[in-house]
Image (cartoon, grey):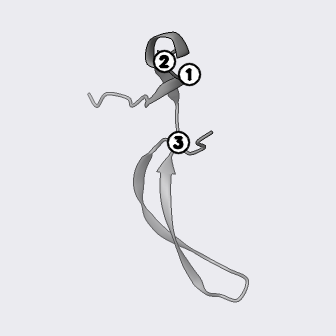
Amino acid sequence: MVEGLIGKKLGMTQVFDEDGNAIPVTIIQAGPCIVVQKKTLEKEGYDSVQLGLVEKKKR
């Protein structure tokens, strides 16, 4: 099984460890996600779901 995270990259920043070293990190908006397609063993030969990231429309 493939495990992962679906999201949108918002930007980069840094955090500091206990020794004061700067560590670069990526900021990700994860979710909300919805199922957009379901694949079945009978039709596609395997079972899976396809997820989509829901984004608000800009006004």
Q: Between disc 2 and disc 1, whose residue precedes?
A: 2
Q: Amino acid at mark 2?
A: Lys
The residues bearing labels 3 and 2 have C-alpha atoms spaced at a distance of 23 Å
Disc sitting over residue 30 in the figure: 3
For the residue labelled by badge 1, is the local secondary structure a helix, a strand or a loop?
loop
Question: Where is the C terminus found, in terms of image quarters?
Answer: top left
Q: Residue at x 73, y 83 (%)?
A: 18
8 sits to left or right of 46: left
Determine whether label 2 and label 1 are within 8 Å by CB.
yes
Q: Residue furthest right?
A: 18
Q: Residue at x 52, y 31 (%)?
A: 32
Badge 3 marks a residue whose secondary structure is loop
Relative to residue 37, is residue 2 depicted above or below?
A: below
Q: Earlier in the sequence, mark 3 or mark 1?
A: 3
Quarter holding residue 58: top left
Q: Say the numbered circle drawn on residue 39.
A: 2
Q: Is residue 32 left or right of residue 9?
A: right
* Comparing labels 3 and 1, the label whose residue is closer to the camera: 1
Q: Residue furthest top?
A: 42
Disc on res. 47? 1
